Amino acid sequence: MKVVLASASPRRRDLLSLIGCSFETYSSDVDESMIEGETPESVCRRLSILKAESASRQFAGTLIVAADTIVVIDNEIFGKPSGADEARVMLNILKGREHKVITGVTIIYKDKIITETESTAVWFRNLSEDDIDSYISTGEYQGKAGAYAIQGYASLFIERIDGDYSNVVGLPLQRLSMMLEKIGIEFREQLNLGDNRT
């Protein structure tokens, strides 16, 4: 079965590769602007649908997987920062507090489409200005929702998480497997897992 990941994210590519999935990637060029009044869940659901639909127009009959991840604190949605200054603002708000990472996942296969969300709670330790400045200097914040990557240097900032770690990275693998089962695709067999696991 041909699988297309509708994402340019190297983190999502790494996650699918980690579980032995063979796939192609397609970068969906969609407008990620927020719509006033949208809930966090509706934002990431809508954007994942747009990405999946864009890919499905290019790869008819293919299994399409798309995702969109946001960070939410005090009902404020943090997407990808526009630059270092916005990243610094985000990290100053997140430090010493709990926030949620929400990912919308959409699957399209033939005439079937399914969209769901996964939410994980993350706690940051209380960062100093030097901590934040040092992190900004790495450039790791670029292209990351909430201005951090849990699998990178920012792992030093995380006190604990409650939920799916892979969701914080950008693609909730357990949720993905359950969604595939709902549309009749057995995860291990159809996505070339089988004996690739160690």
Image (spheres, grey):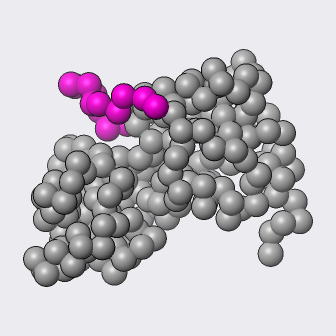
- The reply to whether residue 164 is in sight is no
Asked whether, in this view, residue 135 is left or right of residue 168, the answer is left
The image quarter in which residue 136 lies: bottom left
The front one of 108 and 61 is 61
Nearest to the observer: residue 128 or residue 41:
128
In the rendered image, residue 29, in percent from the top left (x then y), is placed at: 46, 31
186 drawn magenta: no
Residue 3, image x, y percentages: 73, 40
Q: In the figure, is residue 44 to the left or right of 182?
A: left
Q: Quadrant of the N terminus?
A: top right
Q: Where is residue 107 drawn, in percent x and y?
A: 63, 33
Does 49 appear above or below 14?
above
Range of the magenta residues?
29-42
Q: Is residue 61 above or below residue 149?
A: above
* Viewer can see residue 165: yes
Q: Is residue 98 above or below residue 179?
A: below
Residue at position x 16%, y 54% from top? 86
Q: Is residue 30 on the magenta stretch?
A: yes
Predominant secondary structure, magenta span: loop
Residue visible at 21% across and 78% down in the picture:
134
Q: Residue at x 21, y 25 (%)?
A: 36
Q: Quadrant of the C terminus?
A: bottom right
Closer to us: 93 or 81: 81
Q: Nearer the viewer, residue 28 or 165?
A: 28
Left or right, residue 57 beside residue 134: right
Residue 181 picture quarter:
top right
76 left or right of 138 in image: left
Q: Residue at x 36, y 53 (%)?
A: 143
Residue 72 position (above or below residue 56): below
